Image: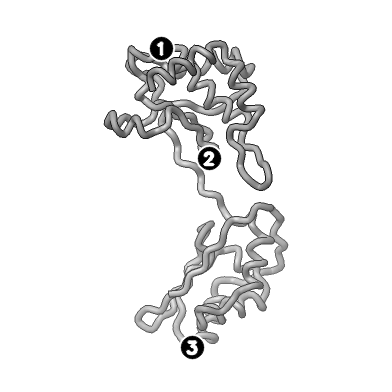
Amino acid sequence: MVYLSMPRPEFNTQLSLFSGHDERFITEYFRKKTGKPVSLILTDNSTSILSARIKSGVVHIRFHRMLLNAGIDIIAEIAEFIKAKSRRTPLLREFIKKNSTCLRNKPPRAVHAVLQGRYHNLGHLYEAINRDYFEGRVTASITWGARGTKRAARRRTLGSYSVHTNTIRINPVLDKRTVPLYFVEFIIYHEMLHAAIGVGKKAGRNIVHSQEFKRRERLFRDYEKATVWERANL
């Protein structure tokens, strides 16, 4: 089986269309080039652009729809790729880069928000912090994370922010009577800062806790008290 997957390019360009090929033409072209019966399936898969395998004497090909708009030189290169397996595909790779907007991004999985804990309601705390520190501009959702064993909970971070789903998760180990409200608020504020500031770049590296992040983190009204409690209890 031959298989071609491509990293999604960082830039976007519009697909330059001509009349294009149809499914019948592609199937017949590959049949002639390979000398075998061909089963062609068109896909919208954003990570597997092209795959082919021979089973019971039939070449089974999964073929991204945008390749129907590739020039005949690229179709010929694909045919050689299917036959030779190890053959390079520079024309195909360049075509994919130029037409990256045709690749569908997989939508993030919906997050079921759990706001009410045993002792703390994340929704109420989030709204108050968003109003007091961010002028209501943070749009991330918030939820308690999954509960696990105490040992597992200690290994996890106290909070996290996912750019992909725009979701803040708070470790349920903090949902205890013995955890002061101001500390839970501090962790929420910390993760909301991530949502507000994003990830910076320096010398090609991602900077999560930049100097600006640290400056704004200290603006939390109970910053000193929260950090002291954390050192003493966690």
Binning the other alpha carbons within 10 Å of mark 1 as few (below 14), some (14 to 19) or many (20 upward) gives: some
* Point 67% across, 67% down: residue: 94
Q: Give the image location of residue 70, x and y in percent.
A: 65, 70
Left or right: residue 206 versus residue 160 is right
The reply to whether dot 1 and dot 3 touch (C-beta < 8 Å) is no
- Disc assigned to residue 180: 1
Q: Quadrant of residue 80?
A: bottom right
Lower position in the chain sequence, tag 2 or tag 1: 2
Between 72 and 162, the one lying in front of the other is: 162
Q: Is residue 229 visible?
A: yes
* Point 43% across, 12% down: residue: 181
| Mark 3 lies on residue | 35
Furthest residue toward left = 149
Quarter of the picture containing the N terminus is bottom left
Task: Give the amino acid at mark 3.
Answer: Gly
| Mark 2 lies on residue | 164
Q: State which mark lies toward you, 2 or 1.
A: 1
